[in-house]
Image (cartoon, helix red, strand yellow):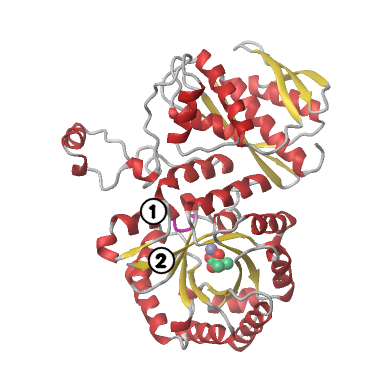
Amino acid sequence: MRRIKIFDTTLRDGEQAPGFSMNLSEKIEVAKRLEKLGVDVIEAGFPVSSPGDFDAVKKIAGKVKNCTVAALCRCLEKDIDAARETLAKAVNPRVHLFLATSPVHMEYKLKMNREQVLEQAVFSVKYAKKFCNDIEFSAEDAFRSDPGFVCKIFGAAIKAGALTVSFPDTVGYAMPAEFAQRIRYVKEHVSGMEKANLSVHCHNDLGLAVANSIAAIGSGADQVECTVNGIGERAGNASLEELVMGLKVRSDYFSADTGIDISQIYSISRYVAQVTGIKIQPNKAIVGDNAFSHEAGIHQHGVLSKRETYEIMTPESIGYPKDRMVLGKHSGRHAFEERLCELGISVSDDAFEKIFAGFKDLAGKKKSVSDRDIEALVMDTAVIIPETWKLDHWAVNTGSALGASGVIRLQHRDGKFEKFISMGDGPLDSVFKAINQIIGKEPELELYELGAITGGSSSQGETMVKIELDGRRWNGRGVSTDVIESSIKAYLSAVNAMLYELGEN
Ligand code: KIV
Ligand code: ZN
């Protein structure tokens, strides 16, 4: 079995895409979950690009112990210096350097010729190598570059000390057979290739990122770069879960596997969707809601007779919760604790008390509490952002003839209560305006999504919001059996994240 390395860039290429931003504590939680998932490398950010990325790489480098933490850098001294600072505490640091090699990028973006690009790449690898042994060099837009030039720059980078060279299809232009051929060519024509790992980094503009990455593995690639749920620039990156399960399910074909604990796939996928506020399309392979549901009668009949008729993998293998719906208001602490255990959720004692109290409250409102409800409660409690403002109570008055009015009473963390009444174009507009009056800021509501956690009219409503202020964005999430309350909670959690990051809590 060949061991393929998984390089996860959810926190860098994924997070840098508009709409996918995460705050610091969410990034740390994603990194912890990636470590538990068993990825080989976590690309934690691009330190020089913003203070937020700098802090995130630094914090993650200090916390993650069992995998490599990479920081992205252009081939510039100031970028590498920033990476050095952020990776100082990492157990296994990696500097990931990139420089474009395609004619269009060199001429119009870099305004450099081939010799200059080659020289800068070699200089940067040597410069970074002074403090970090593990250097990866990526030839940005490699697929649209002259293959001979890419081989030359890879050979020079390896000679200068790079331990991994990466071949990105930056604009998602390649076709699988063509990509496989190119990777084989690189494997055979780079001098010193046997001393380094070959990585690929595929984008999904033509929907082929996973297919191209898999084709590259067939041609000898040692590492694939990917993101949870395939999030990333434009149409995204190769999706981690599809790559990993492709290799797992078809290990007979590839004789290759990864170090991923596949039972963690479902929960990290849900977590990333929740913190970014971007829902997973229902028919998404592996983690979509419909990925394991069989609607057609003939399929249902087949699966009931023998699962393998229409299922090539089991939902349980990726940690998909079986919705047994047996917990209710009479369930005790022990049953609840056991269920958390079965769902692979481990929480501190304090968090357990909070989640259990939330469960009891919910069980009083709903006949039965499903696994999905429990996951939502855990998500709510896992929020590490301090609550500057807590919801005390709310009321709305609305109707078809009149405008809406909303009353909000919040409690500040220092104990004081503030109340405001506001008119609005609808019930949510009125309560959001009342919250804005209390906090003294007017963020824009950029995204609002309301869904049901399980089916049925007694299901909990789950609201995701994204707010924007002066070009910065924060996500919020709220859950309640009342959709107005879940919306208020979501808005307030985004507001608390904003105040925390702005240092106004
Ligand atoms: O797509 C790309 O080429 C990249 C590089 C920075 C590696 O993300
Ligand atoms: Zn990329």
**In this picture, which residue range is highlighted in magenta?**
235-239
Instruction: Say whether residue 190 is left or right of residue 379.
Output: left
| Left or right: residue 476 compared with residue 167 | right
x%, y% of residue 412?
79, 26
Above/below status of 264 relative to 247:
above
Identify the residue at horizontal 56%, vertical 21% (top origin).
483
Determine contact: label 2, label 1, CB under 8 Å: no
Three-letter residue code for mark 2:
Ile
* Residue 207, above or below 364: below
Viewer-closest of 337 and 240: 337
Kindly tell me whether residue 477 is visible in this rendering: no
Specify which label sits upstream in the sequence, 2 or 1: 2
Query: Residue 113 location in percent, x, y?
Result: 61, 85
Is residue 265 visible in the rendered image? The answer is: yes
Image height check: is 91 above or below 473? below
Q: Nearer the viewer, residue 281 or 286?
A: 286
Q: Count neighbours of disc 2 (C-alpha within 10 A) and say few if under 14, some if 14 to 19, many if 20 or more.
A: many
Residue 6 spot, x, y in % from top left: 46, 62
Q: Which residue is mark 1?
A: 242
Q: Is mark 1 within 8 Å of ligand 2?
A: no
Q: Secondary structure at mark 2?
A: loop
Whether 283 is among the magenta residues is: no
In this rendering, would 204 be left or right of 443? left
At 70% from the left and 75% from the top, the residue drawn is 76
Disc ID at residue 4: 2
The local secondary structure at tag 1 comes to: helix
Indicate the amino acid at tag 1: Glu
Q: Quadrant of the C terminus?
A: top right
Q: Point out residue 443 in the picture as x, y percentages from the top left corner.
A: 73, 36
